[in-house]
Image (spheres, rainbow, N blue to C red):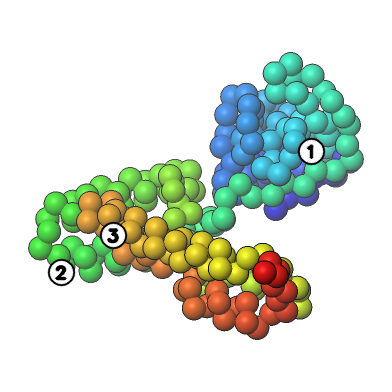
Amino acid sequence: SMKLREGSEANLKEISKTLVQSGYERVEMVEGKGQFSLRGGILDVFPTCSTYPYRVELFGDEIESIRTFNTESQRSIEKVKKLDIFPAKEIITSEETIKVGSDKLREEFDRIASSSKDNERVEKLRKVLNKNLESLEETSSFEAIDSYLPYFTKETESLFDYFKDYFFIVDNVQRCNGKLESTYLEFQENFIAFSQRGDIFPGQGNLLIDEEVVLESFESQNVIFFEALT
């Protein structure tokens, strides 16, 4: 995340690089969330968690003003003193994470290519791999990169790793259990279907936390169950 404040120094080149790494798309004119544009000493950016985009005007290397504005009329709405910009995607790429992810994908493809007799599937995966690696090198990201999370992280985390000593309120246990089961079933069916078509890598099947881990995480927390008393 980035914090921009009125009166502080800023390097637009570095800001632009960080925004791209954080999942923002550079455009000519900002129209939606997750976009930014640069024109001279003016940065327009639409943070993912904001109602309006922001216009940051610089005088030299100093931030002169920060304002929210309307995307249609381009007119200013409100002047603010600071701006917090949060990432637009789950995977934040850096030179290190790009190398880690690229190496893991290449290694997995080599294993598949050397052991599989399905030449059509191998060629499909080769095209997917080359397209993703090329885009990764050019823009630090590629389409559906979030589904490749296991390749770009050494250790994954869940909400339970952030919430400690909280109370979790579960409304209708039976319905929640049903939703949990259907989520994993749907994911598994989709994963098998895409695998058979040769569109995805095996490691993408590790995208979800194990169901047992989810249940164990609840058992180790303070949980309140709301049930109808019939």
Q: Is residue 225 left or right of residue 121?
A: right
Q: Secondary structure at mark 2?
A: helix
Q: Which mark is residue 115?
A: 2
Q: Is the residue under label 1 in contact with that under label 3 (CB below 8 Å)?
A: no
Q: Nearer the viewer, residue 214 or 228?
A: 228
Q: Give me the C-alpha separation between circle 2 and circle 1.
A: 56 Å
Tag 3: amino acid: Ile
Q: Quadrant of residue 205?
A: bottom left
Q: Secondary structure at mark 3?
A: helix
Tag 1: amino acid: Asp
Outermost bottom residue: 220
Q: Is residue 153 left or right of residue 9?
A: left
| Residue corresponding to mark 3 | 192
Q: Position of residue 215 (x, y in %)?
A: 55, 77
Tag 2: amino acid: Ser
Q: Nearer the viewer, residue 211 or 63?
A: 211
Say which residue appears at 72% left-offset and 79% top-offset: 222
Outermost top residue: 73
In primary-sequence order, the first of circles 2 and 3 is: 2
In primary-sequence order, the first of circles 3 and 1 is: 1
